[in-house]
């Protein structure tokens, strides 16, 4: 007697029809998204360490700047760039969002240039310190406008995750702070909050992907 039962529910994983096929049936997995969320939290921790090093340097100006601070800053810029590239791919698959290439590329480029100029400014006795300082703050202005551009692109998403909506607003406010130059410290604090919100975005996508697949 055949064991085939036409009324038995299917045993294969079902995809939620509400989720785009590029997201639910693509290369994304819950474990991958959780790793990205953990990396975003690692970026947050590294940024806190970098802030602590900067405060220590301000309180002890008699000591030479620590080289590890510049190395950590460079690693954080590269990690942030990687996270933004993965976020771009996620938003394209989940929300069909396009147009993030230029804002992301400029953010990464300006971040690298800012890190390099910051290292040069820490070299004491530089004859070009005045010009370097002017260029350094000019880069922050340009970075602020790139953040505004990026945040406005994110605001175009319809029915985003609450985490993504929060991330977009934090990016916009951080962009205003960077562009104004005088609000760099609040912009840095907003950057800390934005990295936590980015981790929440990846964890939210992982949860949605798991809920959209019924056993």
Image (cartoon, rainbow, N blue to C red):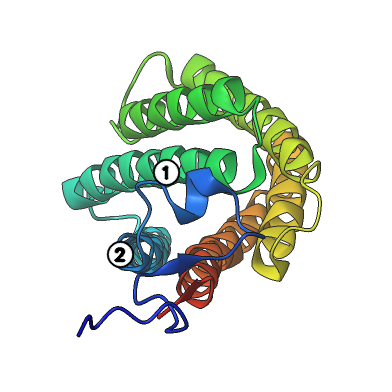
Considering every residue shown, the one lying at the far front of the view is 1
Left or right position of 151 against 193: right
Quadrant housing residue 36: bottom left
Give the camera-side residue of 132 and 112.
112
173 is higher (above) or lower (below) than 178 = below
Q: Tell me the residue that label 2 is attached to.
A: 35
Q: Tell me the residue that label 1 is attached to.
A: 86
Secondary structure under tag 2 reads helix
Left or right position of 161 against 10: right
* Residue neighbourhood size for the residue with mark 2, other residues' Cα within 10 Å, grouped as few (<14), some (14–19), many (≥20): some
10 is higher (above) or lower (below) than 46 = below
Q: Position of residue 194 (x, y in %)?
A: 59, 60
Measured in 3D between alpha carbons, the distance from the residue under mark 2 to the one under mark 1, in whole angstroms, is 11 Å
Quadrant housing residue 99: top right
Left or right position of 129 against 96: left
The residue located at (40%, 38%) in the rendering is 81
The residue located at (73%, 31%) in the rendering is 149
Left or right position of 54 against 4: right
Give the camera-side residue of 133 and 105.
105
Q: In which quarter of the image is the C terminus?
A: bottom left
* Residue neighbourhood size for the residue with mark 1, other residues' Cα within 10 Å, grouped as few (<14), some (14–19), many (≥20): some
Quadrant housing residue 161: bottom right
125 is higher (above) or lower (below) than 213 = above
Secondary structure under tag 1 reads helix
Q: Where is residue 22 in the image (x, y as percent from the top left)?
A: 50, 43
Q: In which quarter of the image is the N terminus?
A: bottom left
Q: Where is residue 109 in the image (x, y as percent from the top left)?
A: 44, 23
The residue located at (57%, 38%) in the rendering is 92
Q: Earlier in the sequence, mark 2 or mark 1?
A: 2
The residue located at (55%, 23%) in the rendering is 101
């Amino acid at each position: 007697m055949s064991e085939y039962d036409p009324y038995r529910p299917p045993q294969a994983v079902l995809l939620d029809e509400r989720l785009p096929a590029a997201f639910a049936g693509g290369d994304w997995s819950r474990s991958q998204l959780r790793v990205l969320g953990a990396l975003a939290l690692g970026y947050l921790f590294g940024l806190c360490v970098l802030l602590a090093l900067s405060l220590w340097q301000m309180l002890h100006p008699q000591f030479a700047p620590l080289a590890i601070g510049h190395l950590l800053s460079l690693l954080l810029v590269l990690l942030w760039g990687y996270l933004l590239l993965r976020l771009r791919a996620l938003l394209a698959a989940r929300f069909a969002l396009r147009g993030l290439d230029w804002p992301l590329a400029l953010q990464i480029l300006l971040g690298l240039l800012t890190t390099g100029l910051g290292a040069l400014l820490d070299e004491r006795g530089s004859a070009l310190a005045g010009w370097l300082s002017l260029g350094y703050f000019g880069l922050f202005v340009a970075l602020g406008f790139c953040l505004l551009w990026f945040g406005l692109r994110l605001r175009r998403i319809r029915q985003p995750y609450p985490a993504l909506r929060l991330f977009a607003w934090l990016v916009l406010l951080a962009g205003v702070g960077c562009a104004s130059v005088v609000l760099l410290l609040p912009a840095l604090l907003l950057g800390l909050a934005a990295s936590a919100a980015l981790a929440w975005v990846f964890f939210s996508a992982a949860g949605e992907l798991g809920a959209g697949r019924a056993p």
